[in-house]
Image (cartoon, helix red, strand yellow):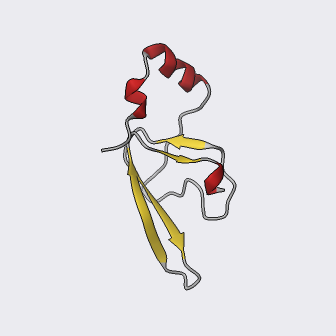
Amino acid sequence: EGAHFLDTLNPDEVARLNGHGRRLAFSTGEAIFSQGDRHGGIFIIESGQVRVFYTAPSGREITLAYWTAGHFIGGPEMT
């Protein structure tokens, strides 16, 4: 599973990519960012899974996707 786009990079490209970011760890259930929040860019998932959901006006959480290692989340379209 996962996009595994990093698998196509050579070691120098991986090092260059890592040099532009920072490693963060999140606990189970901890929000990376919330609906409507501005966030700090793109997050590459190295392990675990991320649940993406929308909170409806009724307060019900509607799951949109589960992303796993090799995927990324974030970007301007999610602000």
Residue 58 sits in quarter: bottom right
Q: Position of residue 66 (x, y in %)?
A: 39, 57
Vertical arrangement, residue 48 with respect to residue 13, above or below? below
Left or right of 32, for residue 46? left
Q: Nearer the viewer, residue 27 or 42?
A: 42
Q: Nearer the viewer, residue 29 or 47?
A: 47
Q: Residue at x 53, y 70 (%)?
A: 54
Vertical arrangement, residue 72 with respect to residue 18, above or below? below
Q: Residue at x 49, y 14 (%)?
A: 12
Vertical arrangement, residue 2 with respect to residue 38, above or below? above
Q: Position of residue 3 (x, y in %)?
A: 38, 40
Vertical arrangement, residue 43 with respect to residue 36, above or below? above
Left or right of 58, for residue 28? left
Q: Residue at x 53, y 34 (%)?
A: 23
- Position of the N terminus by quadrant: top left
- Position of the C terminus by quadrant: bottom right
Q: Position of residue 26 (x, y in %)?
A: 49, 48
Q: Residue at x 49, y 66 (%)?
A: 53
Q: Position of residue 19 (x, y in %)?
A: 59, 23
